[in-house]
Amino acid sequence: MVRKIILFLLMTGLSGAVELSSMDSFRSKILTSAVSFYFNAQGYGKVENAVVDTTKKTLQFILLPEGETQKLSIGIGYYHIEKIEGEDTLILQKVQTNRTWLNRIFQDHMEDGIKIPLGAVSKGAGALLLNL
């Protein structure tokens, strides 16, 4: 899994992050790459049009769910990093979608949010780079 994250980040252009004009853009790229890789690797679908606000710690994106034809709009009202079992983990909370039934599931059963292990993205530097 760690090697896949590294490969994904390199393939999506993160290797050229030094050329990015700001640290904020770099943080956004790391975050969107980690979320995109996670949703794809879990078989949930493909993430498109991700928009990050690193000041408010929010995230918006479109998900084309695996096996579906209609896209799903997802808003993350807050994200942060926690150490879980010694590994930096990205926590996505206050999840809102354009599907009422799915919003109810998140509200009723996922108070702790969606947990995304950062693996190689982190290794101590991920949390620092994301400034979470």
Image (cartoon, helix red, strand yellow):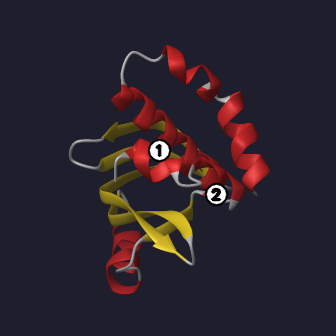
Indicate the amino acid at tag 1: Leu
| Residue 98 image point, x, y percent | 35, 56
Q: Amino acid at mark 2?
A: Gly
Q: Which mark is residue 119?
A: 2
Tell me the residue at 70%/31% (across/down). Answer: 10
Question: Is 10 left or right of 108, judged from the image as shown?
Answer: right
Residue at image coords 34%, 85%: 108
Determine the image quadrant of residue 93: bottom left
| Residue 104 % position (x, y) | 34, 78
| Coordinates of residue 122 in the picture (x, y in percent) | 56, 52
**Residue 59 in the image, given as x and y percentages of width and height:** 35, 47
In the structure shown, which secondary structural element does the residue marked by tag 1 occupy? helix
User: If the image is split into quadrants, where does the N terminus sit?
Assistant: bottom right
Q: Is residue 61 left or right of residue 12?
A: left
Q: Nearer the viewer, mark 1 or mark 2?
A: 2
Q: Is residue 33 above or below residue 58?
A: above
How far apart, in angstroms, are the residues tagged by discs 1 and 2? 13 Å
Whether residue 104 is visible, yes or no, is yes
